Amino acid sequence: MRIADKPENEKLRLKAIDDLGLWESPPEERFDRFVRFAQRLFDVPIAFVSIVGEDVQWFKSIEGLSIETSPRELAICGHTMLTDDVLVIEDCASDARVYGNPFVVQPPYVRFYAGVRLNAPGDLCIGTLCILDTRPRTLTRDDIGILRDLARMVELELLAQSKSSSDDLTGLSNRKGFNDISKHAIAWCRRMEKPATLMYFDIENFRSINDDFGTDQGDRVLKEIAALLLQEFRNSDVVARLGADEFCVLLTGTDADQVDKPLANLRDAIHEENLNHPYKVAYRVGTVSFDSKVHKGIDDLMAAADAEMDKLKGRS
């Protein structure tokens, strides 16, 4: 195992982390969604966004491992910080930089690593976006391009003064965040010939709840719906609030006939919530399967789901 050298601009890099207020900042859905999406998209057991400090690598978001930090000297990401491109190690067991690393020769037995540096202004690397597997892997040129694009989106979030891709009330992706992630998801499904399903939800009586019970109750309904969608669908599904009373869920690798169970669970959960309120929440949902011959991208798929939802108007 070879411990990575520290960048020449190490002091400036650490100052950038401090200036951005990133170190040990609380978990945020806007980063979790990118990590879950990367994990799902590349079918890997482990994915994370890390911030690399002076002596410790701290995980801003991580899926597949129950750790918050690791010693910097053991971080494979130290090597990623020294390259301007995606670092891909197809088999860690045969790479001198990482062979002997405890993460390679002990649980979780990492064999594949791919990481992209995350930069602050001035080309100061503050962390990485990484995917790991317990078996050797290769990435295509398209895969590398997608991972690089995801890293740039995470980078923008790390640097943003406002949560430009998140809905402030619910913490879900907003329309921009949903579009950013979904265009890559649909491109991947097209290339890999995988199914995808989009579900477009409309809260039918939201305006009357606001009018009759006040906007505080309306906000409570939106937060409850967001929480139930996250609860009933998979962590890797892209859940978003698109507008005042509109939500959507994009499920990759899933046909429309496979959403009956989570939909039934959602219906039952909303029924239980309705028992506790003086109002009754009702919704419509349009469901459409991705067809590469019909849908050019996420915009076409959303339009089709919206049309399906409109057909159900008044039938809740």
Image: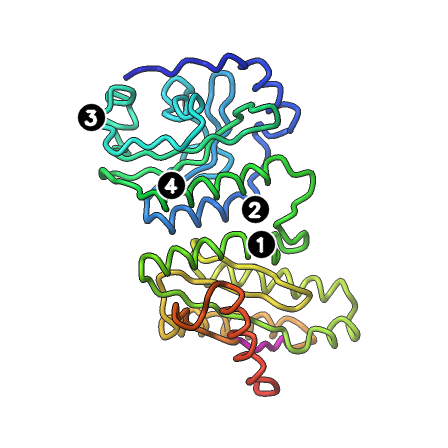
Q: Which residue is mark 2?
A: 30
Q: Please provide the residue range marked out in magenta.
A: 281-285
Q: Dominant secondary structure of the magenta stretch?
A: strand
Cα separation between marks 4 and 2: 22 Å
The residue sitting at 60% across, 73% down in the picture is 202
Q: Which numbered tag is attached to residue 94? A: 3
Q: Which residue is mark 4?
A: 144
| Dot 3 alpha-carbon crowd within 10 angstroms: few under 14, some 14 to 19, many 20 or more | few
Cα separation between marks 1 and 4: 24 Å
Q: Nearer the viewer, mark 1 or mark 4?
A: 4
- Position of residue 297 relative to residue 22, above or below, is below
| Dot 4 alpha-carbon crowd within 10 angstroms: few under 14, some 14 to 19, many 20 or more | some
Residue 261 in view (yes/no):
no
Cα separation between marks 1 and 2: 7 Å
Q: Which residue is mark 1?
A: 173
User: Residue 76, image x and y in percent?
Assistant: 36, 25
Most foreground residue, 223 or 311: 311
Cα separation between marks 2 and 3: 35 Å
